[in-house]
């Protein structure tokens, strides 16, 4: 849903309002912030195995 909102903003004039675009970006940043503490140790573990 969020990706669809962001993708529709690239089409000129047909995308959602700037407020909806900002909310979608904030949601993506929030999701990255939640998953980063989990992903970073996993990436370190994978690199240690290589």
Image (spheres, rainbow, N blue to C red):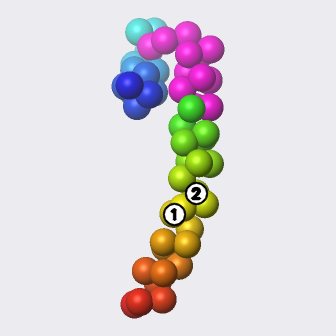
Magenta part of the chain: 15-26
Report the residue at 57% width, 32% height from top.
27
- Asked if residue 17 is positioned above or below residue 8 in the image, the reply reads above
Q: Where is residue 50 in the image (x, y as percent from the top left)?
A: 40, 90
- Say how many tags the image has: 2
Task: Give the secondary structure at mark 2.
Answer: helix
**Residue occupied by mark 1:** 39
Residue ID at (58%, 57%) = 36
Residue nearest the viewer, comparing 39 with 4: 39
Q: Can residue 10 be seen?
A: no
Which labelled disc corresponds to residue 29? none
Give left or right: position of 7 versus 30. Answer: left
Number of residues whose C-alpha sits closer than 10 Å to that of mark 2, classed few (under 14), some (14–19) or many (20 or more): few
Residue 44 among magenta residues: no
Q: Does the magenta stretch include residue 18?
A: yes
Q: Do the residues labelled 2 and 1 touch (CB within 8 Å)?
A: yes
- Residue 6 rendering spot, x and y as whole percentages: 45, 27
């Amino acid at each position: 849903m969020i990706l669809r909102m962001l993708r529709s903003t690239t089409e000129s004039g047909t995308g959602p309002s700037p407020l909806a675009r900002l909310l979608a970006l904030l949601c993506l940043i929030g999701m990255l912030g939640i998953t980063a503490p989990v992903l970073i140790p996993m990436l370190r573990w994978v690199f240690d195995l290589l």
